[in-house]
Image (tube, coloured by chain):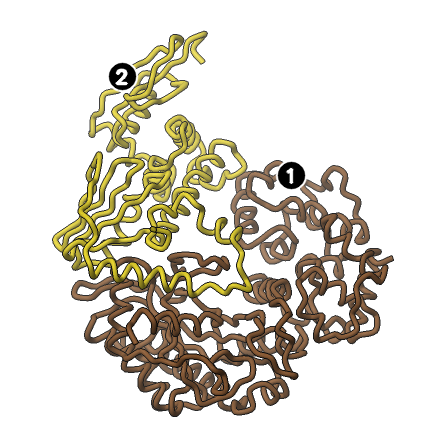
Amino acid sequence: MNGEVNLVYVYDGTLEGFLCCIYESYARRQVPDEIRCEQSQATFFDRTEWIRTDTAHSDKVYGSLAEKICLESQDFIRDAFLTRHPEKEILMYRFIRMGYRMGRKVMDFLTDDTVNTLTKAVRNLHREAHLLKGFTRFTLYDNVMVACISPKNKVLPILADHFADRYPDETFLIYDKTNQMALVHKPEGTLLTSMSDMTLPPIEDPEKAYRTLWKCFYQTIAIEARENPKCRMTLMPRRFWHNMTEFDL
Amino acid sequence: MDILEKLAILADSAKYDVSCSSSGVGRNGQSGKIGSAAACGICHSFAADGRCISLLKVLMSNACIYDCKYCVNRVSADTPRTSFTPEELSDLTIQFYRRNYIEGLFLSSGVLKSPDYTMERMISTARLLREKHRFNGYIHTKAIPGASQALIDEMGLWVDRMSVNIELPTEKSLQSLAPQKTPEAVIGPMARISEGIRSNLADRDHFRHAPKFVPAGQSTQMIVGASPDSDLRILRLSEGLYQKYKLKRVYFSAYTPVVRDPSLPSLMTEPPLMREHRLYQADWLMRFYGFTSDEIVSPKHPNLSLILDPKCAWALRNIDHFPVEVNRASYATLLRVPGIGVIGARRIVQARRVGSIDFEGLNKLGIVMKRARYFITCRGKVDVGVVFSPDIIARSLLSARELSLIPAARGGQMRFEDLPEMREIDGAKKDVLLLNPTNEVTEEYERRSEFGICV
C-alpha cells in the first residue's frame, strides 16, 4: 500500500502487456496493489499508471521466468493468463516476485495462498479444456465444421492443438461465445481471432439425420434401472448442455 | 430396416457392456487421416445413468446362437434381431466422429452363425474404418470366445483394445448360467491376446515400424450379483488377471435382471450398485494404491463392507499402522491413509519440499480431512477433537443415515430369510444383511462388533 491510495497498473489486456507491468514495477521500484486491463473501471481512490506494451521488455521478463524460476513456470504463467480468475494479474505478479526470490521451489509451494489460488485456477482451466475436448459438438455446413462453446476460461488456445491434430485435413471453426474469440482451422494452418457474433444458416438434411441418430443413441445407451441424474450433472454440468446436440430439441 | 431402427436395437443390446473407456494409447493425428487418440481417454457425454459415453457402443449383430441365461440377446429371448453391415457401421462411426460426438468405436456382437463368422464381420468393419475412411481414432472390439487364433491375431492389428468378457468369476457359475461357454473358450483368447501384445512389444524394440498389436491392451468384465460368488473370489480373480495376463482393466457390472429364471435373482431385484461401487474401490486399491487382494478381503472376511469403504475398513483393521506423520511418511505410506488419494499424496510430497505442512495446509492441498484427520499427525500433533480409538473413529466415519440402518436390522423390522435374494436389494439394506450372524459372513459381523457398531 502506498499510503491511502491504491496504485493501479493498467495494461492493454495482452500477455505481453502484463509482462511489461512486471518490468515497469522493477524499473520504477514500485509495488502495484492492482493490475487491471484497460477496459475495467477505476475508482476514486486509485492512482492509475498506464503501462505501455513494449515487446523488448516483455520478452526479457518472459525469458527471465525460465532463467530465474524454471522452464515450466513459463507455461504456468501463460496458462494462468487464460484463466477466469478475476484477480489473476496481481496473483501472477506476486507469484513471479516470489519466484525470483525462491527459484523453482515456488512451483511446489502449494500451501502458500498465492501459489495455491493460482494453481487451482490453472487446474480449473485445464479441467474445463479437457471436458470441452469431449463436449464440443460440430455441425456440418457443406464440409465446413462449426461448433459453438461457452466456457468460463479462455480455453481456445489449449483446444487448438487438440482439434487441429484430430482433424488435420478438415476446415473447422470453433466459436467461443463467452470470450468472443474463434479458432479457425484449414488444412494450411490454424488461426485464433476475435469474433463478436456468429449467425448460422439453417441445418440441411443429411446433417439433421445424423443428429437424430446421435440423439437416438444417446437416449438408448442409458440403463433405466441405473438412472442417476445427480451423477450425470456432476460429471457434465448443465452449463455445457445447451451447446450439445443430444440436448437440442 | 433403416439405420435408425438398427441403431436403436443394436445400441440397446450393447448397453449392458460396461467398458467405454478410450484410454491406454496416445496417438497423434496424421495428415491424410482423420482422428487421434488421447492416452487419458476423453468422455464425450454422460448418459442419464451417469455413465460416460466415449465410444459408439453397439453390437455388430444381436442375433446369437448361445443361450446364456443372464443375457438379453440369448437365442431363446423373443426380441427383434438385426445386424449392421460393415459398410453401414463404418460410415456411421466416421460421421459421428467428424461431429465430435465420439472418440471411436466399441464393437461387440452376439454370436452370429459361428464365432469365426462373427469375428470376420467385425474385422471387416475395423478394416474399412482404417483403410477406406483413413480412421486414426480409437477402436475397441470384443474377441468372441471360441474364435480361431488366426482371426484374433488379425483383429489385433486393426484395433487399439480388445476384450474378452469373463462374465462369471467361477467355473461353477459359468456352468449354471452360461452352459455353452467354457472357461477355456474365454481364457484361450485372453491368453492369445496377452501373448500377442508381449511378442509385439519385443518386435517393436527391434523394428521401429512394426505394426502395433492391441496397443491399448486388453480388458474384461464380470457380472456381479447374478451368481452367489463372494467378493473374495472376484477380487482374487481380478488380481490374477492383472498379474498373469497384464490386463489394463477389469470391469464389474451390477447385474440388472432381464429374465425370469430359477437360477437367477428375481426380476424385482435392483442392481447391486453399492456392491459394484465397493468392488471398484477395491480394484483401485489394487491398481494404484499398492494393496493386495489379501489385505482387502480374506477367507475370514470374504465380502466387502457396504457401509464402510475398503480403505477405511483396512485402516481400522490395521490401526497399529496409524497415526502417520504427513511430513515424514513415504509416498507409499501416505497412499494408505483414508482421505489421501494418489493426487493428494503427490501434492503432499511436492509441498513438503518447501516446508512442513500443518492441518490448514492439508486442507489447501485438497486432502479429504473428514476422513484423513483420524489417521494422521502434522508436526507430531493430532487434529483437535480426534480421539485415537478404532471404535470412535468407526462411528465418526459413518453418517447418521448409515448408523441408523444397523439398529433397524437388529430390531427385526426387515426379514432376511434368503441370502441370494437379499444380496440384490439396494446397497444400504443389503449391508445389514452382512451383519446377519447365520450366514457365511459371520466374521463380518464379529469385526463390526469389535468396532462397537453393532453392540
Q: Which residue is drawn at 22% across and 45% down?
A: A183
Residues marked 2 and 1, same chain: no
Crowd rating for badge 2 (residues with CA inside 10 Å; few <14, some 14–19, many 20+): some
How packed mark 1 is, by other alpha carbons closer than 10 Å (few <14, some 14-19, many 20 or more), is many
Query: In the figure, residue B108 lies in which quadrant?
Result: bottom left
Give me the chain letter of mark 1.
B
Q: Is residue B149 above or below residue A55?
A: below
- Residue shown at 32% from the left, 51% from the top: A136
Q: In which quarter of the image is residue A119?
A: top left
Could you tell me residue B288's position as x and y percent?
55, 62
The answer to whether B363 appears left or right of B136 in the picture is right
Q: Tell me how many marks there are.
A: 2
What kind of element bears circle 2?
strand
Look at the image and give the colour of chain A.
Answer: yellow
**Circles 2 and 1: CB atoms closer than 8 Å:** no
Work out which residue is located at the far right of the displayed protein and give it: B455
In the drawing, does residue B40 fall left or right of residue B393? left
- Residue B44 at x, y percent in the picture: 37, 57
Q: Mark 2 points at which residue?
A: A50
Of residues B447 and A51, the one nearer the viewer is B447
Q: What residue type is labelled 1?
A: Phe
| Residue type at numbered disc 2 | Trp
Element assignment for label 1: helix
Work out whether residue A66 can be spotted.
no
Where is residue B93 shown, x and y percent of the image?
29, 68
Chain ID for brown: B
Q: Name the residue under label 1.
A: B359
User: Which label number is shown at residue A148?
Assistant: none
